[in-house]
Structure formats: C-alpha cells, structure tokens
C-alpha cells in the first residue's frame, strides 16, 4: 500500500545518504587552524559556555536576535502566503495555480537575493546590507499585505520583491555570523545563532490560531509577525562591522 511505498522510499534514500556520510567522515579532515586553536585553548570552558562568556556574549546574542527576527518574519510570509492568497477566492475555488505561482516567484527571487548577498556585503558592508535587507523585508510585507484587496498579478511582483530581500538577508547572515567568532568556537556560535532563531519561531507557532483570530485574518497576522524584521534591524545597529577584518583566530 501507500504506507509500504513510503517506507521503501525512505529506505532507498537513506542508504546512499548513509554511504556518503561515512565517506565524508573518513575523507575529510579537521582544519589545521581549528586543531591549533583547540590545542592552545583553555579546556575549563565548554564550547557553548565560551560562546556565552563575556568576551563573546554580545556578538552571540545580537546574532541570535538578528537571525531570529528573520526566521519569524520569513516563516510568516512563507507559511501564510498560500492561505492569504486563498482568502481572495470564493469558497470552492482551490486557487492552486495562483498559490503555486506566488510561491514560485518568491522562491526564485530569494535564490537571486542569496546570490547577490556577497556582492552587496563586500561593497557596502555587512551591517548595512543586513539593515537594508531587513528593513525592505518589512516594507515589502506591509505593501503586500495592506494594499491588495483582490488578487491580481501585482501580487507576483510584490512577493518577488519580498522574496529577493528575504534571500539577501538570510545569505548575508551566513556570511556575517562566522566572522564574529574565533576558530575554536565558530561552529558552535553560528549554530547557537541559527537555532536560537528557530527556537523563537517554534514558540511563535504556538500562538498562530490566537493571533489569526484576534487580528482578523492571515494578512494582518503575517504583517504582525513581519514586524520582527525590525528587531533584526535594531540588532544590526548595535552589532560590529566585520568587512575587511577576516576570520578571527
């Protein structure tokens, strides 16, 4: 039955992934810089404890705030746009083409945004790229969710604008976060920043039903969550610039 096909599919995918994982584990070696930093470091602190130590706590918390703001806003736009698009159509009309096309343009524009993040961050700086991209994410969300009273192709252009700057914001954070921390704790610190944002998003999910009901629909609710982009802007204001500094050792 379908269940058996699903299990077989998972098993079929798991085998090559497992083989690849074993190959990578045997073939790849740790960076010499990382080995050297571990050998010369103090062993009385755990890696996470070192990330949250006074020397690195500010960067860790600001990085987590910035990425958390992005993920909450991104989750709202990605998860709720299909329902928001559906709300323009009468009951019984699936709107599959419109919903699918909307997500296609958002995703395509996000890929372009990711591809241009390096160019922007190298020319105007990491902090400026973060602040501009996050601010435009909020403005684009406001335009998208407040100016459309009926579905039209304008939605595709507006969602592409939002998608581009979401991709730009997400990519520049993956450039910026590693540049804040020394080699020994870099992976742990970046993981802390990324997953603190995901934890915040998971908590936000618990209040979806209440917020949609109290604000009167998916559009106002998505805009409410998009305000989290402004938290990320403020975090970037108080962060340090890393352009041209290289990775700290």
Image: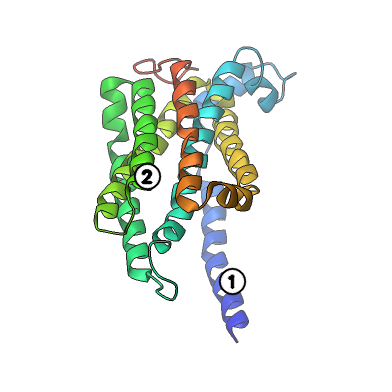
Front-lying residue, 148 or 128: 148
Front-lying residue, 197 or 224: 224
Residue 150, image quadrant: bottom left
Q: Residue furthest top?
A: 55
Front-lying residue, 243 or 128: 128
Dot 1: what SS? helix
Specify whether residue 92 is in view: yes
Residue 209 percent location from the top left of the image: 61, 53
Residue 134 percent location from the top left of the image: 39, 32
Task: Look at mark 2 in the image and give the residue it sits on.
Answer: 146
Residue 221 percent location from the top left of the image: 51, 46
Which residue is depicted at the point 31% across and 32% down? 118
Residue 11 tag number: 1
Residue 204 tag number: none
Q: Earlier in the sequence, mark 1 or mark 2?
A: 1
Which residue is depicted at the point 24% across and 57% down? 153
Residue 217 percent location from the top left of the image: 50, 53
Which residue is depicted at the point 45% across and 15% down? 240
Q: Quadrant of the N terminus?
A: bottom right
Task: Give yes or no for contact between labels 1 and 2 (Cβ–Cβ under 8 Å).
Answer: no
Specify whether residue 75 is in view: no
């Amino acid at each position: 039955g379908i269940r058996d096909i699903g299990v077989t599919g998972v098993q079929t995918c798991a085998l090559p992934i497992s083989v690849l994982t074993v190959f990578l584990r045997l073939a790849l070696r740790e960076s010499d810089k990382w080995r050297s930093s571990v050998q010369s470091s103090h062993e009385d602190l755990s890696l996470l404890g070192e990330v949250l130590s006074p020397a690195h706590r500010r960067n860790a918390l600001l990085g987590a705030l910035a990425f958390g703001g992005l993920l909450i806003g991104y989750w709202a736009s990605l998860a709720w746009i299909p329902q928001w698009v559906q709300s323009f159509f009468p009951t019984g009309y699936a709107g599959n083409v419109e919903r699918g096309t909307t997500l296609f343009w958002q995703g395509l524009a996000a890929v372009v945004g990711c591809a241009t993040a390096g160019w922007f961050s190298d020319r105007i700086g990491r902090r400026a790229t973060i602040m501009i991209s996050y601010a435009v994410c909020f403005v684009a969300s406001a335009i998208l969710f407040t100016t459309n009273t009926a579905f039209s192709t304008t939605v595709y252009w507006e969602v592409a604008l939002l998608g581009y700057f979401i991709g730009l914001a997400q990519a520049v954070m993956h450039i910026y976060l590693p540049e804040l921390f020394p080699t020994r704790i870099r992976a742990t610190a970046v993981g802390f920043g990324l997953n603190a944002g995901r934890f915040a998003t998971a908590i936000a999910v618990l209040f979806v039903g209440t917020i949609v009901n109290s604000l009167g629909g998916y559009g106002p609710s998505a805009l409410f969550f998009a305000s989290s982009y402004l938290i990320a802007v403020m975090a970037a204001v108080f962060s340090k610039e890393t352009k041209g500094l290289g990775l700290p050792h």
